[in-house]
Image (cartoon, grey):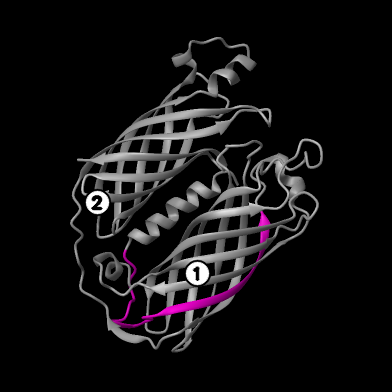
Amino acid sequence: MKYLLPVLSILLLFTAVCPVNGQTDSLYVSVKSSFSLSLHTGFIISHRPALVHLQKRHLRMAEVQYLKSANGDKTWHRIYNYPLYGLGYRYIDFGNDKELGRGHSLYSQLLLPLSRHHRYSINMRFGIGIGYVEKPFHYETNYKNLAIGTKLNGTVLTGFQFRMFTKKKIHLFGGIDFFHFSNGAFKLPNLGLNLATINFGATYFTGDPIVSKIPAKEKLKRKHEFNTAIAIGFKERYPPEGPNFMVNIINLQYHLPWGQKGLFGAGSEMIIDQSLRGRLEEDSIQSSYLEGSTRIGVFGSCGLQLGKWDAVLQPGVYLYSKLSEDGFIYNRLLLKYRFHQHFYASLGLKSHFAKADYFEWGIGVRI
């Protein structure tokens, strides 16, 4: 199960980039806002043996969404067949009242139609936001909860959804979701909560849809580019209630556009993680500051072009790391926003398989 999230992310990105045959030449486009209600059932993914005991019974969720349809005034709206975007809220019964309690999450989300016909669509779903877990780890009263160390966390959503247009203003839908809670190791323990669910629901649109023609292929004005970025993160080192350490990252990346939607490339980076020396000393390994704190990695990169936004997955390998406990493979989910022709801001989550390492905030230059 520890490979599930990286593999799923690659599959979702590949599916979104590749064209899907079978679309009609016209479709219903909802031009105003919509409200949705859905119910979920599923389970906690025990990606570590230490989390198996948290699976007491099936989890349940209720989800409310407010979505708007892209109106087509931007090129990427038309390329992605008029996606839906907006806010969602989830109330979560984790199925374990004693050690997890209940949860809440508020998040922004994007539904990208992979295939959109006159009366139905198949969509890929992304989301990112904040979450609340009622009963995090406590060294006296809740020491068995090794998944989450804070009440406030970040959340990430991925999934597939099938929508059927039963009437002009009503959609019925169902799908599968993977929902992740993590504080990015800002406070330990933080093995992370990974939730897999199936869901069913209905959407009501406030305005009448219009019939729109599928546009001819349009080309985005993206060329190959070099990026360099610096980023910063914070993380706690075991045992829980220990000190926080700073992480500094500098990287170089090269990207090429892939068709109308995708981009791919590669890069290298140097990471100065101040928490690593302490972990080495616990294993009686002595090192200088730079020798023990430095990690050097190379990574591949694939993602989606969404106007001024890029959503990117970067699987990587450490070429140098004095600490081998985490393994030599890592992953990063990265969201980049271009606020200027040559500059962008980024938010990333770096992990070793399904275990978060840290959140990072960065700024970069495009050449």
Q: Which residues are magenta?
A: 19-44
Residue occupying the point 56% across, 9% down: 286
Which is the main secondary structure of the residues drawn in magenta? strand
Q: Residue 43, relative to residue 24: is it above or below? A: above
Whether residues under marks 1 and 2 lie with C-beta atoms below 8 angstroms apart, the answer is no
Say whether residue 287 is left or right of residue 146.
left
Q: Give the percent coordinates (x, y) of residue 106.
A: 55, 60
Q: Residue 244, relative to residue 90: is it above or below? A: above
Q: Residue 341, relative to residue 117: is it above or below? A: above
Label for residue 161? Answer: 1
Q: Give the percent coordinates (x, y) of residue 237.
A: 61, 28
Badge 2 is on which residue?
257
Label 1 crowd bin: few (<14), some (14–19), many (20+), radius 10 Å: many
Confirm whether the magenta stretch covers residue 232: no
Quadrant of the image occupied by residue 301: top left
Confirm whether the magenta stretch covers residue 38: yes
Say whether residue 202 is left or right of residue 365.
right
